[in-house]
Image (cartoon, grey):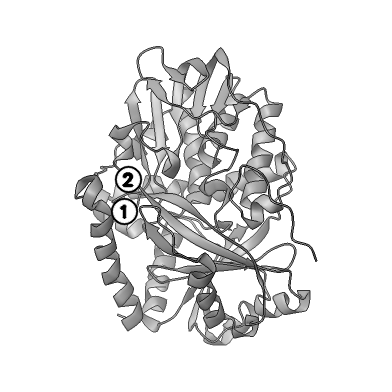
Amino acid sequence: MDAPQQNIGHAPSYYAATANDRAARPSLRGEIAADVCIIGAGFTGISAGLELAGRGFSVVVLEAARIGFGASGRNGGQIVNGYSRDLSVIERRHGAERARALGAMSLEGGNIIRGRVAKYAIDCDLRPGNFLAAFTQRQMLEIEETRRVWEKHGHTGLEMVDRAGLARIVDTDRYVGGIVDHLGGHLHPLNLVLGEAAALESLGGRIFEQSPAIAVETGPSPTVRTRDGLVRAQYVLVCGNAYLGKLLPEIGGKIMPVSSQIIATEPLDPALTRQLLPADYCVEDANYVLDYFRRTADNRLLYGGGVGYGGSDPASIEGAVRPHMLKTFPRLADARIEFAWSGNFALTLTRIPHVGRLSPTVYFAHGDSGHGVTTTHLLGQILGEAVAGHAERFDVWASLPYYPFPGGHAFSVPLTIIGSWWYRMRDRLGI
């Protein structure tokens, strides 16, 4: 079988090669006006735009490259509920009231995705169910405690699985058990964001590609300037995440771009993929630096893992990730790797999304710290609510403390790597 053709302007990923919509949007030229200007056409920005357009606001979205160019179009495609820090950690750090508020929102991102896929008939290979796999009994105890916390916050779709039950989920001897989240799932993320973008355009929203913002005026009548154009708006939403760059240093210094690498095999025998993952759930493991994998709609295995702090990549993505795949599935030793790519997500020091205001007219949300598929949809909707005058939920997020990475630009990456070594060692030693 010939490999799918690449999609110009996107990373060389399986997703870009199998995108439903390859139409390029124009770049911004000249001066235009809108109620709201959104910087970034990823999940956060498009989700906010849909919420606002549905409320009758005129919306302009500026994208530096292509719709879904960043993490939204490159990630593992897993609908993982919750945040990158457990609700029990949030309660210890920020108190029971904030934990209750965030817990009440913690399943909403997945519900937003499922609702929009149904409402707008988005073809993105949506499948139910995800599995968190444990290597050790210590991890099983931690997962069991997470289940108790989740159920306290109203999540009743969880199912503990012991070693005897693993065969119906994943065909490997690496794990001792885990937990199924029946409210999780997996999908083709680029086709999701492209479908949502088309839905936004159907509601009157305008999206300009190849239009990076180069300056933002945060005053009472904010403006966003590109190389060839200018948007005058009543509100600006900054949704650049790991690809924000140096546009707004006052918030960019509180996130770090971190790369994750993914490979996708050639199409496999359907009987083999059913044997490897009988329930067709996506899987991630419980290690600090975790692996994640799933079946695709055309019977490939998509396998990801690893981190590159500061956005760095290994010399060979396939060389870094394929050995992990073969530890999990030795039967794939002869499977050809057809795609290998990486993408950056935005990490915060607290591992909790960074949300706030730069002025009364300029809002931002970023730093989903590896749980972006669901959290971006939630925060996009909350940004839209805040612009519409309903900022109660936005203010819960904005009230959380956030900090710059220690060491400044020169030392933040090496210090973070040193910290990660400790957690990697714990995973290896099973402590």
Residue 335's x, y, as percent? 67, 77
Q: Where is residue 138 in the image (x, y as percent from the top left)?
A: 36, 80
Q: Which residue lies furthest to the left in this view?
A: 407
| Residue, disc 2 | 98
Query: Tag count in the figure?
Result: 2
Depth check: give the residue in front, 327 or 200.
Answer: 327
Q: Do the residues labelled 2 and 1 touch (CB within 8 Å)?
A: yes
Which residue is at a point 58% across and 48% down the rendered structure image? 73
Extreme right residue here? 1
| Residue ID for mark 1 | 90
Which residue occupies the foreground of this view, 50 or 29?
29
Quadrant the C terminus occupies: bottom left
Amino acid bearing label 1: Ile
Left or right side of 417 for 328? right
Occupied quadrant, residue 365: top left
Seen at 52% across and 45% down, the residue is: 70
**Residue 187 visible in the current orientation:** no
Q: Which of marks 2 and 1 is nearer the N terminus?
A: 1
Residue at the front extreme?
A: 315
Distance Cα–Cα, label 2 vs label 1: 8 Å
